Image: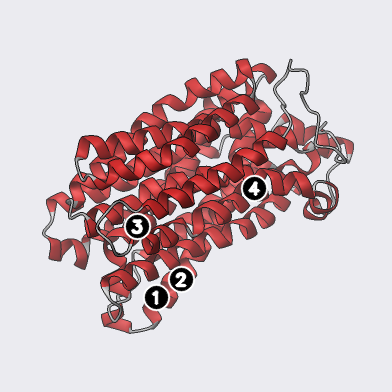
Amino acid sequence: MGRVAAASLAGTAVEFYDFYVYGTAAALVLGPLFFPTFSPLAGTLAAFGTFAVGFVSRPLGAVVFGHVGDRRGRRTVMFASLALTGAATVAVGCVPSYAVIGPAAPVLLLVLRFLQGLGLGGEWGGAVLLAGEHAPERRRALWASFPQIGPSVGFLLANGVMLALSAGLSDAAFRSWGWRVPFWAAGLLALGGLLLRSSLAETPQFRELAETGRRAGAPLVEVVRRQWRLLLLTAGALAVGYAVFYAVSTWALAYGTERLGVSRTVMLGCVMAAVAVKGAVTPFAAVLGDRYGRRPMCLAGCAVCALWMFPMVGLLHTGRPALMFLAMLVALLGFITMFAVVGAYLPELYEPRVRCTGAAVGYNLAGVLGGALTPVVATTAAAGGSGPPWAVAAYLAGIAVVSLGCFALLPETAPGTASARRAPAGEPAPA
């Protein structure tokens, strides 16, 4: 289990590094470089628009790689998705700016961001299933939480490199070539992740499905036909996590530097410190999920997010680093209370024969609902006026309330609980 956990964590860390480094670059430099004819606000919105494309392609990646995972195995997905995302990220660092090739620059950026999302859409499902299906039943949330630590590690790597370059280079050098270095580094990280995954075995549950001939012929068709309500509920339930995380890690970064005049280094430092604490807390929250159940943890985390959005925005608006850090930290603790157990919870909700497709599509549809437009909507809502952007808080709190309702309709799945493995009415229970 240690080797499986390390490989799943390393892979998600690399893939989310690739995904996050784009979000940080979009908040800091991509607007002026690739959309120079726009105003500063419009350029940032356009950069966040290309950022959103990665979320739109993630469900498609979940469908493609979910099919592969349910037909060919979880291990195959982990190799193919990592290779695709790594190659696309390196290519982003090589795209010439608008000043060099004109309108072709943002078009290339858009295409590569689409490919990034495609690869990441397959990564999560393969990683959590590889860990969860190898794990002992009563420790499944703990072991399946290691892929959930990967995003924190990837975020810290991405922003750590950006922070070092931003602090060590002049503004002109950073905008000229410094921002490209983190994208080039993705190639080495991807090769390391592929090497670590090369010795992993297929999961026992998939081997059993293959040996007994019970693999799904068309996994997506089965999920849509037999578990469509569950798919929509899981997507709606997880939307708040994406909205909160990207509000903290992407929108707040742009808001602090552009609107409040806080230095890039200070903003990155605040975000990174909050994400580091979130990553450290993840396995402890997962242990609670194994002990008390997945659903109670999700309901508690969602409630914290709903209640904290207005205080968060008020604290961010102060521009004081300590208060901004507190605002981000509480929001991310609410987020990880939910997402620490999601690696076990989502797969347990779906039948094993369609588990890779169902869990991955539900997880990535939530990204579209909660993450794709959050930086754009929040940036637009915060434009103008001198007071705190309460409209952003209302938007985030509204998503949290919807997600809370979806979680309330989902069943518990943890072994030993009275409602374990009982699906919503009218749907088959997972085997």
Residue 1 appears in the figure: no
Residue on which the image places disc 1: 106
Name the secondary structure under disc 3.
Answer: helix
Label 3 and label 4: CA atoms lie apart by 30 Å
Label 3 and label 2: CA atoms lie apart by 15 Å
Residue on which the image places disc 4: 235
Image vertical order of residue 390 relative to residue 74, above or below: below
At a point 44% along the width and 77% down the height, the residue shown is 107
At a point 39% along the width and 61% down the height, the residue shown is 381
Task: Where is residue 279? Give x, y as percent.
Answer: 41, 31
- Contact flag, marks 1 and 2 (Cβ < 8 Å): yes
Q: Amino acid at mark 1?
A: Pro
Which label sits on residue 225? Answer: none
112 sits left or right of 80 in the view: left
Specify which label sits upstream in the sequence, 2 or 4. Answer: 2
Name the secondary structure under disc 4.
Answer: helix
- Contact flag, marks 3 and 2 (Cβ < 8 Å): no
Question: Which quarter of the rendered picture does the C terminus lie within?
Answer: top right
Q: Amino acid at mark 2?
A: Leu
Residue on which the image places disc 3: 183
Nearer-the-camera pick, 404 or 151: 404
Q: Amino acid at mark 4?
A: Ala
Residue 86 appears in the figure: yes
Question: Where on the picture, by quarter, is residue 271?
Answer: top left
Residue on which the image places disc 2: 110
Task: Where is residue 314? Give x, y as percent.
Answer: 31, 43
Nearer-the-camera pick, 296 or 294: 296
Q: Amino acid at mark 3?
A: Phe
